[in-house]
Image (cartoon, grey):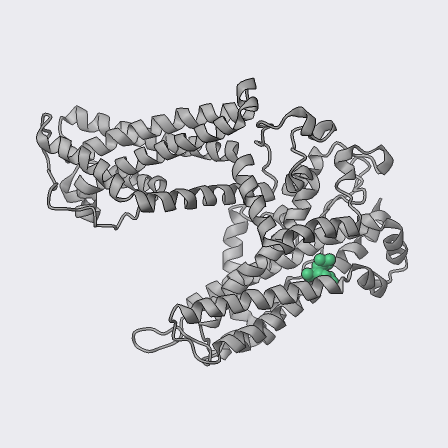
């Protein structure tokens, strides 16, 4: 669990804050400082962009790790296919053979290149530290070259292979499944649409069932691959940047849940590092400098990013009308739908409570246990028993669902029917999970608030003064900010739908606005309730100890 990892890694196990290392001190920010740090960055999109750009740089070791991790399967599958075809002395086509060869080369090249680069980033020699710009330029050139080789391999196979021409049966080629697998992973790595047929000219036919000695057609298929590369250079550039973005974004979110183990010291000179055990974290970047509280900070930032996720699903859901009777008996049918999914998720160990994921239908999460060796000093998050999900479900079924009616629906089947219950329940479940995650981040917020005012909160906890706790956790400025951002985000979604030509009904925009306003108001209230419960439960923890 992410937070467990974070806490275990914390060098400070002492409740005596004055004896804590700088690492621990930085977890416990004053509420003012905390909000300043977070809001400063959250409020300015440009700062968020900076964070992402920074992540591109600091996450390079992870990205290279991912690249190195992905390629072995391609290496083995291409090598195996080539060996089999060579053994039989029969290739499906010349292009397929060439494509597989290039793919094998690309995979080996990527594997070794990514490995070396990862090593250089994690253990940078002196010249890399000194000339970091050279290193970055080298990495960029390597990445472009690598991508080019992958595109060449994919296109060469795509042009000549029967895999595409005759989809499932591979036009009689041997090892059809393996060919499909090799091609599919090439498309993923090369970022190419497998159904794109524009590459098929009449030039290269499906040359079935015969291995040829090197003929003119071989060179044609090779040069076709390269020509294709040139022709596609535009989309290549776009895709490259999208890839970098996606790669860094995914490791960014990975980081968010605690997988920061691979971060290297890269080329940051020692003088710019923070002290003590956090010496590998560059000071000049405010986000990553706060390595421990950055997790808290990023979690809280993710609450803002989730605002877009919530609005996006809400917009989509708004376009599906539903039969009101579907939600009878407090949404029993929906809960039944979710229960099935949750049982499968639980059975396969997919729930991750450390990521603030709480079930809607399964028994409640068991709380963390306080022991002398694990005393949970202020600032250390621990799991309590409270789940806000029943409140979220009730609100969803009774207040939000009535917004999703035929006056906002855009969806229809060819037979003019507007119902699609499976799509409806799937979106419901997704939306509920997003709302739940967003609201339960309140637990982390509550812990930081408590840590910044232990005395004030302790008195209220002892007096079981829930109203007093409510006053302390409430921040109306913050609430106004959330509501304003939700309204802005939702109008952007409406605008996108309307300007894209969707034939949404006139009421679509205004209903969506109303639904979002009601939803976010309720979400703040539920989050506040979760915070109050969390803080109140700290008293139980104390009593147990
Ligand atoms: O950001 C905070 O301080 C929170 O406690 C979160 C939150 C919210 O849900 O957005 C909840 C209660 C506060 O009144 C303000 C905002």
Using the image as rendered, state which of residue 319 and residue 51 is in the foreground.
51
Residue 510 in picture, x, y percent from top left: 53, 77
Q: Position of residue 124 (x, y in %)?
A: 55, 22
| Quadrant (top left/top right/bottom left/bottom right) for the C terminus | top right
Q: Nearer the viewer, residue 304 or 327?
A: 304
455 on left or right of 189? right
Tell me which residue sits at (58%, 55%) in the image.
305
Point 57% across, 31% down: residue = 262
In the figure, 358 relative to 295: above or below?
below
From the viewer's perspective, is 198 left or right of 68? left
Residue under the point 35% across and 26% down: 108
Give x and y (percent) for residue 326. 49, 75
Counting from the top left corner in percent of width and height, residue 355 is at: 61, 48
Relative vertical location of residue 123 with respect to residue 459 in this rendering, above or below: above
Q: How many marks?
A: 0
Residue 54 drawn above or below residue 462? above
The residue under the point 14% across, 34% down is: 220
> Can you tell me which quadrant of the image ligand 1 is in?
bottom right
Residue 503 in view here = yes
Q: Is residue 384 visible?
A: no
Task: Work out whether residue 16 or residue 349 is closer to the camera in this orientation and state it.
Answer: 16
Would residue 403 appear left or right of 466 to someone viewing this image? left
Classify residue 527 by image quadrant: bottom right
């Amino acid at each position: 669990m992410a937070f467990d990892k974070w806490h275990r890694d914390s060098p400070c196990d002492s409740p005596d804050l004055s004896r804590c290392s700088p690492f621990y001190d930085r977890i416990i920010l004053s509420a003012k400082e905390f909000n300043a740090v977070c809001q400063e960055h959250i409020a300015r999109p440009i700062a968020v962009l900076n964070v992402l750009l920074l992540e591109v740089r600091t996450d390079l070791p992870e990205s290279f790790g991912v690249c190195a991790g992905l390629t072995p399967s391609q290496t083995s599958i291409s090598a195996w296919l080539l060996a089999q075809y060579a053994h039989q002395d029969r290739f499906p086509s010349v292009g397929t053979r060439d494509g597989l060869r290039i793919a094998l080369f690309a995979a080996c090249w990527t594997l070794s290149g990514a490995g070396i680069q990862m090593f250089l980033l994690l253990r940078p020699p002196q010249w890399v530290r000194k000339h970091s710009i050279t290193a970055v330029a080298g990495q960029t050139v390597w990445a472009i070259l690598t991508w080019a080789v992958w595109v060449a391999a994919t296109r060469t196979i795509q042009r000549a292979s029967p895999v595409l021409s005759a989809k499932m049966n591979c036009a009689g080629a041997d090892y059809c499944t393996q060919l499909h697998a090799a091609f599919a992973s090439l498309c993923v790595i090369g970022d190419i649409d497998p159904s794109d047929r524009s590459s098929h000219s009449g030039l290269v036919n499906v040359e079935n069932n015969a291995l040829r000695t090197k003929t003119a057609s071989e060179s044609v298929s090779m040069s076709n691959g390269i020509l294709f590369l040139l022709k596609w250079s535009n989309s290549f550039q776009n895709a490259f940047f999208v890839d970098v973005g996606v790669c860094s974004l995914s490791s960014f979110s990975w980081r968010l849940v605690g997988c920061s183990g691979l971060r290297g010291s890269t080329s940051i000179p020692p003088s710019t590092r923070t002290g003590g055990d956090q010496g590998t974290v560059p000071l000049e970047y405010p986000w990553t400098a706060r390595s421990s509280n950055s997790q808290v900070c990023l979690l809280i930032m993710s609450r803002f990013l989730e605002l877009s996720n919530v609005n996006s699903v809400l917009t989509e859901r708004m376009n599906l009308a539903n039969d009101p009777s579907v939600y009878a008996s407090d949404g029993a049918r929906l809960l039944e739908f979710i229960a099935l999914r949750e049982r499968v998720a639980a059975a396969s160990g997919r729930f991750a409570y450390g990521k603030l994921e709480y079930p809607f239908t399964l028994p409640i999460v068991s709380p963390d246990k306080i022991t002398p060796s694990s005393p949970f000093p202020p600032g250390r998050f621990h799991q309590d028993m409270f789940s806000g999900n029943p409140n979220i479900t009730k609100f969803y079924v009774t207040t939000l669902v009535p917004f999703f009616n035929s006056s906002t629906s855009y969806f229809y089947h060819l037979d003019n029917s507007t119902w699609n219950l499976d799509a409806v329940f799937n979106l419901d479940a997704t939306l509920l999970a997003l709302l739940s995650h967003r609201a339960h981040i309140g637990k982390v917020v509550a812990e930081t608030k408590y840590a910044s005012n232990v005395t004030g909160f302790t008195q209220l906890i002892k007096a079981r003064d829930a109203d007093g706790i409510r006053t302390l956790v409430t921040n109306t400025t913050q609430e106004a900010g959330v509501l304003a951002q939700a309204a802005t985000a939702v109008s952007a979604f409406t605008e996108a739908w309307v300007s894209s030509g969707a034939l949404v009904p006139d009421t679509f925009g205004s209903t969506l606005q109303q639904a979002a306003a009601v939803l976010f108001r309720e979400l703040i209230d539920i989050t506040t309730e979760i915070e109050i419960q969390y803080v109140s439960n700290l008293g139980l923890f104390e009593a147990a100890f």
